[in-house]
Amino acid sequence: MKKLVLLLLLVCTCATLSWAQNSKRITVTGTVIDGDDKSPVGQATVQLLSLPDSTMVVGNVTNNNGVFSINARPGKYVLKISFVGYLTQEKPLQLAAGKPSVNIGTVTLPTDAIMLGEAVVVAEAPQVTVSEDTIGYNASAYRTPEGAMLEELVKKLPGAEIDEDGNVKVNGKEIKKIMVDGKEFFGGDVKTGLKNLPVDMVEKLKTYDKKSDLSRITGIDDGEEETVLDLTVKKGMNQGWFGNVDLGAGTKDRYMGRAMINRFYDKTQFSIIGSANNVNDQGFSGGGGGPRWRRNNGLNATKMLGANFATETEKLELGGSMRYNYRDADESSIGQNENFLTNGSSFQNSNAQKRNKAKSFNADFRLEWKPDSMTNIIFRPNISWGDTENRSMDVSGTFNSDPYQIVTNPNDYLNFGNNEDNSSEELDKIRVNSSKSWSLVEGNSLSGNASLQINRKLNNKGRNITFRGSFGFGNNDNDQYMNSETRYYQEGLLFRTDSIRRYITTPTDNYNYAAQLTYSEPLARAVFLQFSYQFKYQYNESDKSTYNMPYGWVYNNPLPVNFEEDKDEEQSKYAQYKYFNHDMMVSLRFIREKWSLSAGMSFQPQHTVLSYKKGDFATDTTRNVFNFAPNMDFRFRFSKVSQLRLTYRGRSSQPSMENLLPVTDNSNPLNIRMGNPGLDPSFAHNLRVFYNTYNAEKQQGIIAHINGQLTQNSISNSRSYDEMTGAWTVMPKNINGNWNAFGMFGYNTALKNKKYTINTFTTLRYTNNVGYLTDSTKVERKNTTTEFSVSERLNAAYRNDWIEFGLNGSFSYSVERDKLQRVNNQEPYTFSYGANTTLTAPWGMSFSTNIANQSRRGYSDVELNNNELIWNAQIAQSLLKGAATVSFEMYDILGKQSNITRSLTSSGRSVYQYNGVNSYCMVHFIYRLNIFGSKAARDKMMNNRRGFGGPGFGPGPGGHRMRPF
């Protein structure tokens, strides 16, 4: 504590000295906007020239919102603002000592029509640009197939990854929201934007860390910033209606249909989207990174309809969306699991079939009102409704040793019964159990949330106060019908069968509210002391009722008469939670021309009350805990295109109240769970270092970051294995030693004539997993598994007005180590290589194809050591003067793609193979509804589809005009 006090005194002393040294300087601020569309002009040059000799005294550039800030001593000056493609603006300015800050308001830069009409740079648009925290991408530098959606463009961006579940990471950071011209698109929902925004409408993309509403307005770092992908719509598209219709039909009864219509006018956006398909939302990928290696699990049919709007005036911003979704997923899987024990392993194989149907409706709204220059009000309500029906059938078997040593495919021998084709004497000797289960879960939910934030500036030096309130509610009803049979094979239990037939209903109600007050006090020039206090209350009530069904009842039959009389009190439970949370935060914030620092600490007293009843056990218990969480954010700007950022966050988390109760849940006889009253809170440390730089002349960019996380007292599962039944008894316990580190280095550059590009993306990852293992004597030992992996992706491309050709390759190597069971050590690696090309003919025909081979080696699971040669192709012809396109697409022409996932933890490894939509052909008809837009915009879109030249891009191949990015 003494060290903390001394540190704060030192910081305050430094702040006071800094203030004394700069007390005579005056801060000049303002905003620069485009004279045509009133959008912010980022990276405009701002200079303060002294009179009478016009010598530059100080200079800076505007940020991405067009805002600038410079400091100077009292005197007479000329403020000069310039940017290529605009007419320079000059404004006389007199700074007086008695006025410490001057806001010149909004400066409009008129377009330089002469320069834009004649000055042409014959070169390709740069793939990547960097400006402080923002990384920008020019859509014209990446060629995509006809009718491509945003997802196909994102996959080509250097450093971009789309994982098995469709989540997007750019340079190692997950994209949380999609924005269009700075406004949230369908509440920022990433998957909706990726699947429904056509590439044709996108001029630029940029990623940056968007602060929360509270942090953006007050400057108080609440740790809630989100990485967003912000799209800029092509110039001229905001002068009418535009959109597209895409219809497709294919082999194997595949279909897809998609439509979108937009109205972008000045500061107003309106969009309606709709889609339906049974191809797992796939789109043709013309190259860049080669064919997708994403998991393609199940046969999914989806339907979606939605509307989105956003508008703003000088004082008011409004936005919102509504969307309806339907999904029908038919999934089959074949799985194998190896569970590590201290004296060997237990093995489990399974076959599963699932049919899940879901309907949902979501609506959100956003209002930001600035009644005057000192007040800001933000209101965000939303509501959601859902209805689900999930059916599943699962067959599994547990073995005391590796079944693959006896039969080629143990999954063919999992059904138990009188069928001799599904039996094996040798396999039965190591078989522990066989299980069959069927279930139907029906659920519906309704929830809503609303937040209100009111900020009031008390002066123009940074003193402000903010109130933030929120309220939410939720109601869920779930009904589960299930049958299961488990047969045991070990001596003493031979052919004993446990049968379970149950109906379970679980209504859940919850609500919460919170109130927060924040205050920021300027201590000196650009030094702020910030306080925040929040009170939050949460209530949750769940009443699980379990009823045993009579022999012969199956899960899809009607419930028996008077079934309520057979309630199983031991398997039923009632729980009521009440949370009272206080969160107090204090921090110091320093802002300088080259650097900024925010450091603070939050303190979180928590009081929880639980009323719980299960069978004969009933309790009313309380828990009081005290959390604290430090945080720090330091940024140093070497230049406007180069920066270093260091962040640290500490987070404390509590085990659930139910995990702290001495209660056993044996509703599943093969997976028994016990509570642990001795659990302690866990604390996670997260440190991140980020660096980027960019050379505009050479079109070279470097991005690097390192991220490390260490968790103290992390909650792990201690698992005890019964060799007679194959059952696991699981108890949560604290454990230390879980940590991981991740490093990334990305480099991209243009070569000769800017027509050749190369980008490389290197990652290193180390994971240290710890857990508890037991053997047949119930002796518990701590196990550690480590995984070190290094991967490299390299892409090279050549492009001109009619051809793009690319080569791509990747390599990934892992070292897996198991401390207790060294026989599980292995060093798997994968590598892939391929090529892609796109040809564009003068008569409007294009041909795109990619082919790549992925190879896996070094796996102990022999079936994983294989090759997959994936080849896709598309041929497209433009019609009706570019307003329509017909295309023929072929996916996985050689039929080699598989859907396999693999995971490794301290307690075991697993491999699953799924059915999916792989090899098929499809014919598309695309019609672009841009006939109501401006003629210039229509011409630009059509010429862009013919090549990189055309109006707006200069007369030569790949030429582009010097417009601001």
Image (cartoon, helix red, strand yellow):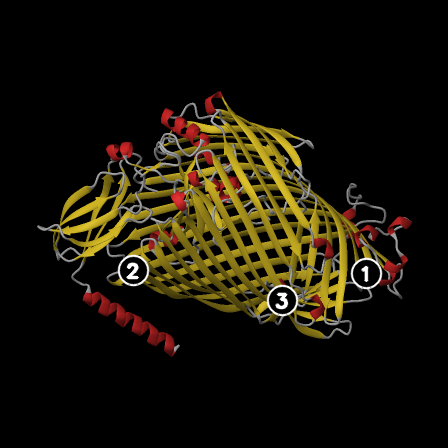
When asked about the image quadrant of residue 57, the answer is bottom left
Q: Secondary structure at mark 3?
A: strand
Q: Which residue is mark 3?
A: 716
Q: Residues within 10 Å of mark 2 (few under 14, many from 20)?
A: few
Query: Measured from the top left, where is residue 237 in percent x and y?
Result: 39, 31
Q: Secondary structure at mark 1?
A: helix
Left or right of 362? Residue 70 is left
Which residue is depicted at the point 33% across and 76% down?
6
Which of these two is toward me, 260 or 898?
A: 898
* Distance from the alpha carbon under mark 2 to that under mark 3: 44 Å
Q: Which residue is mark 2?
A: 594
Query: Measured from the top left, where is residue 755 in percent x and y?
Result: 42, 42
Q: Secondary structure at mark 2?
A: loop
Which of these two is toward me, 913 or 33?
A: 913
Position of the N terminus by quadrant: bottom left
Which amino acid type is marked by label 3? Ser
Question: In the rendering, which numbered label is found on residue 636?
Answer: none
* Distance from the alpha carbon under mark 1 to that under mark 2: 65 Å
Which amino acid type is marked by label 2? Lys
Which amino acid type is marked by label 1? Gln
Indicate which disc, 1 or 2, sits on the residue closer to the N terminus: 1
Taking 913 as reference, is 889 above or below it? above
Q: Which residue is mark 1?
A: 405
